[in-house]
Image: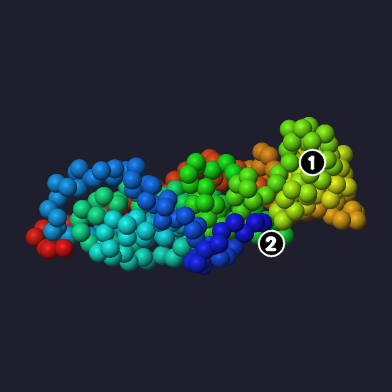
Amino acid sequence: MHDWAVARIAVLTRGDPLPRWAPVPPDLPQQVARALAEDVGGGDLTASLIPAERRGRAAVITREAAIVCGIPYVDSTFAQLDARVRIEWRVAEGESASANQLLFKLEGPARALLTGERTALNFLQLLSGTATAAHSYAALLHGTSCRLLDTRKTIPGLRTAQKYAVRVGGGDNHRMGLFDGILIKENHIVAAGSIAGAVAAAKRTASAVPVEVEVEDLDQLRQAIDARADIAMLDNFSLSAMRAAVAINTGAQKPLKLEASGGITAVTVREIAETGVDFISVGSITKHLRATDLSMRFEFEPGEEA
């Protein structure tokens, strides 16, 4: 919906059935640096017990089926710790992995491998879990013209990472934050006096961004259409009301894009898409997150110089 990221690197996702390009967030190195800082602090006291010359190898598997996401974060984690760490990936970003599948191998100074383990796996399990959840919904929309959107209900400090994972999983991004899109809700309407007044103010002050209005009934939808908003969010509409909204919008002189939102589950998402709405936003794909179960196994080589 909104191209929020301007990045020099793009990752080709391969999650069937919705492959797409997902730009890597430009603040990725800073996110990794913050994660390492909160974990390592002034130094890894336990890893310092290992001789500096000791080398090691490790392999990471997934214990469950998942859409793999987070490869650039893992690479950055170990690159920031020690450039001598070498990583050999056996999967691609966005690829579907099966339970007990090998994801990657790495080798290098044992201290760096041990220090980076938790941070690297935290990113990989979090983002794979997000991508897997997004993919589970996006796959249910396959064959329709409806697109899955995320929301701002993300883990604080990791919004760009999770929104990247949504795209890897086959979804699309709603606005990144309050700065790149306007969503007029009930309180904004009350403060502005009317939907027409709120939309007019939005068009005057931020004409370059899409203006969306949250509507609670068909009358408010008509007001949003008359006000020339760009998108109407159908908040907790029943299926019959969504169908009516699509019919009203189709007959309008300047139709809006329609987004369904509120209480949407994997059970209901397909039939909602079949009403003819353009977008379905699902907060649970980033909010109700279950991290992918991963395991890292080590081997150490005593006496070998780093």
The residue tagged 1 is 198
Q: CA distance from mark 1 to mark 2?
A: 36 Å
Q: Is residue 169 visible?
A: no
- Residue most toward the left? 303
| Residue 13 in picture, x, y percent from top left | 52, 64
Position of residue 146 in the picture relative to residue 54 (left or right): right
Amino acid type shown at disc 1? Ala
Q: Quadrant of residue 60?
A: bottom left
- The label shown at residue 143 is 2
**Quarter in which the C terminus is drawn:** bottom left
Q: Quadrant of residue 265?
A: top right
**Tag in front: 1 or 2:** 1
**Quarter in which the N terminus is drawn:** bottom right
Residue toward you, 184 or 255? 184
Residue placed at 19% from the left, 43% from the top? Answer: 46
- Per the image, label 1 sits on a secondary structure element best described as helix
Residue placed at 57% from the left, 65% from the top? Answer: 20
- The label shown at residue 208 is none
Mark 2: few/some/many CA within 10 Å (<14, 14-19, 20+)? few
- Residue most toward the front? 205
Residue toward you, 89 or 80? 80
Are the two marked residues, 1 and 2, in contact with CB atoms closer than 8 angstroms? no
| Residue 279 in picture, x, y percent from top left | 70, 52
Residue placed at 36% from the left, 60% from the top? Answer: 75
Q: How many marks?
A: 2
Residue placed at 54% from the left, 43% from the top? Answer: 154
| Residue 55 in picture, x, y percent from top left | 17, 60
Position of residue 208 in the picture relative to residue 254 (left or right): left
Mark 1: few/some/many CA within 10 Å (<14, 14-19, 20+)? many
Q: What is the image's colouring? A: rainbow
Amino acid type shown at disc 2? Gly
| Residue 257 in picture, x, y percent from top left | 77, 53
